[in-house]
Amino acid sequence: MRASLSKSDNALSSLTSVINSRFKRHHSIDDDYPVISSSSSSNDEKKIHVDTHSDHRVPLINDDDNNNTAATTTTTTTNQQMIFQKSLFSSELMKVVEWFNQLNDRQKETLLREILNSCSSPQWHILSLLTTDNWHRDCPSDCSDPLAQLPFDISFYILSLLDPVSLARCSRVNKLWYYLCSHPELWHQLAKHKKWSFSSHLLDQQQIEFHTNEQRQAQWKQIFIERYRLRSRWLNGRCDVKTFHGHVEGVSCVQFDSQTIISGCTDGTIKVWDMNTTNEIITLVGHSRSVRCLHVDGINEVRLVSGSNDRSIKVWSISINQTWSKCACKLTLLGHTDTVRCLVVRDDICVSGSHDHSVKVWNLTNGSCLQTLVDHTDKVLCVQFNWQYIVSGSTDKTIKIWHYSDGSCLRTLSAHNGSVTCLYFDQEQDLIVSGSLDYDIRFWQLSTGDCCQKIDWISKEGHRGVIRALKADSWRVVSGADDKTIKVWDIRTGVRLCTLKNHTDGVTCLSFNDYMIVSGSFDGSVKLWNFRP
């Protein structure tokens, strides 16, 4: 009997060795299915006799060793079951592999998707370890680059939909993306977009010419970068401030061009300043009382139009170069019976508003008064016009819209609780913006006269003093007030963009373009706020 058991044990060991060897060689999953060791026990007394004629096993040991015999019996049975299961799995797995190899690529991909849907975390982990070195093994070098696989026109179109920050980030991906993202036409489209264009057509063209090379090719990427940085500085209130000292009383009005700043004072003088050096170039003396309003235009020979408390409007000619300067009063317009508080000029037409409650239209070539508009019941403090409408604001708390050609009053806007001290209107945007003695800024629809928005200090972080100056362009409103601050607003939403503080007294007047703000104050100073990057 012992000889029979030894022979059986040797056969079992041989079978186990063969199965483990084949399974490990073909499938390498010994960690999941441990190899069963069938080494012979050194204690021959504890082997089991298998009775082929009965369903039970008869131990060949003493009664005192019953417990050890039972454990040995259970272990042997479990080992046999595992050997059988492993052999069966190996056989079935080989069939699956052979079947898988017979599938085409599409079928294999479908099968893998189904299997992956049934995997859990342990399977995903081992899958990631086994496949790391095989990613894109047979793929071209740029197989994962979508732009490399697409025609240029489609890649260009996709990139043209990106905002500038995303476009700049894409340029860092690789050389191909940098080449595509640097295409001049992409940056040309961005630079010409309404959001990034200059409000002044003249300044827009000057910047393009400055960044045009000898081959007459505009450097659109550089042009856009400068515009982006400029707008960012406006939005964050980052600017350099210069101060011009020389007036002995409060500054009541300011204007500027590319090289000079011109300011009017309550002492009746007009000063011309060098914008770069802050030096005073020349002082104009001609008005007998406070100068209340100014307009300047021209390039080589500057035309200056001024209005005063002495009831007159004067037209000046100013020439300035590096070695000398000259000025002359060319024309004096008389007709108002009280202070000329405001004026605006287009070509050779001047429209003025006065404390005599009237608005007058003048021809600057001969000094004749073309028409007088009378409907306000108190002082006219501000006026604007184009070739279709004249808009005026008054101490009577109203804004009136006049027809330019015949002088008829088309509409009266009433909502302010104080004098309307300043205003701006843009027919293209169908918009009027007004500031008032009541500390509020209001937005109106030009076509209907409805007040569509109000900015006050409680709800919109508005001014805490009388608003004395207000200008606007296509995307921003700039206002100055007695609270010593200048605030910049988004013209579409009314959101405050930034607040500028540097004056020591109330801000009385301001003017601005895409690069800078020039302001005057009761403190007698003129300040230049330069946003140029």
Image (cartoon, rainbow, N blue to C red):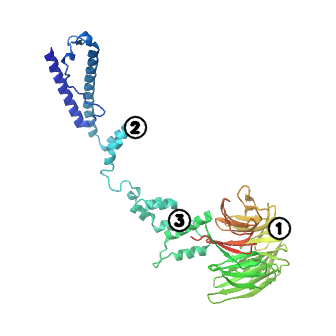
Q: Judging from the image, what secondary structure is the residue with disc 2 in?
A: helix
Pinpoint residue 234: horizontal percent, then vertical percent: 61, 66
Quadrant position of residue 451: bottom right
Q: Position of residue 242 (x, y in %)?
A: 65, 74
Which percent across, then down, holds residue 92? 27, 31
Q: Secondary structure at mark 3?
A: helix
- Mark 2 sits on what residue? 121
Tag in front: 1 or 3? 1
**Amino acid type of the residue tagged 3 in the rendering:** Leu
Q: Mark 2 belongs to which amino acid?
A: Ser
Q: Gap in Å between the C-alphas at discs 2 and 3?
A: 47 Å
Q: Secondary structure at mark 1?
A: loop
Q: Which residue is mark 3?
A: 190
Estimate the spatial distance between the alpha carbons at disc 1 and disc 3, rounded to whole Å.
44 Å
Q: Is residue 481 left or right of residue 224?
A: right
Asked where in the image residue 246 lies, by quadrant, the reply is: bottom right
Q: Is residue 352 left or right of residue 492?
A: right
Sequence-first tag of 1 and 3: 3
Front: mark 1 or 2:
2
Residue at the front extreme?
A: 64
